[in-house]
Amino acid sequence: ATFPVVAQEKPAEIIAAQIRMQGYRCDDPAQAEHDLKLSKPNEQMWVLRCANATYRVRLIPDLAAHVERLD
């Protein structure tokens, strides 16, 4: 499966919206970096930088994102 939504121009805002729905706080999402080393065919890994925190987010189709706070 692919992530057509994340492929758009503003992945930081899209991923921030996803983790907010799961109860994580992300103020002012500034940047989302696609981590190609940690990504797999059906799991895309991103590092999301927000004003208040930085998160590692694993996106898996049809499942909740796995979110890990990095700072």
Image (cartoon, helix red, strand yellow):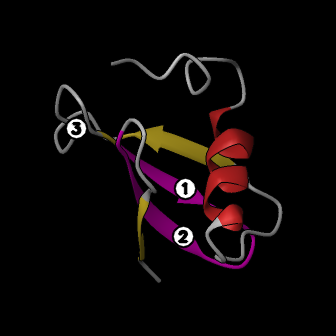
Q: Work out which quarter of the rendered image holds the N terminus and state it.
A: top left
Residue under the point 24% across and 30% down: 42
What residue is disc 3 on?
Answer: 39
Viewer-nearest of discs 2 and 3 = 3
Which three-letter amino acid code belongs to the residue tagged 2?
A: Thr
Q: Position of residue 45 (x, y in %)?
A: 33, 45
Instruction: Measure the alpha-carbon separation of dots 2 and 3.
Output: 18 Å
- Give SS at disc 2: strand
Residue under the point 71% across and 79% down: 52
> Does the stretch in magenta take in 62?
no
Query: How dense is the environment of label 3, judged by Cα within 10 Å: few (below 14), some, or many (20 and up)?
Result: some
> Does the stretch in magenta take in 51?
yes
What residue is disc 1 on?
Answer: 48
Instruction: Measure the alpha-carbon separation of dots 2 and 1.
Output: 6 Å
Instruction: Measure the alpha-carbon separation of dots 1 and 3.
Output: 14 Å
Dots 2 and 1: beta carbons under 8 Å? Answer: yes
Which three-letter amino acid code belongs to the residue tagged 1?
A: Leu
From the viewer's perspective, tell me whether residue 18 is left or right of residue 3. Answer: right
Dots 1 and 3: beta carbons under 8 Å? Answer: no
**Residue 51 versus residue 49 in the image, above or below:** below
Residue under the point 54% across and 16% down: 4
Query: How dense is the environment of label 2, judged by Cα within 10 Å: few (below 14), some, or many (20 and up)?
Result: some
What residue is disc 2 on?
Answer: 54
Q: Position of residue 47 (x, y in %)?
A: 45, 53
Q: Which stretch appears magenta?
A: 45-60
> Mainly helix, strand or loop, the magenta region?
strand
Q: Residue furthest right?
A: 28
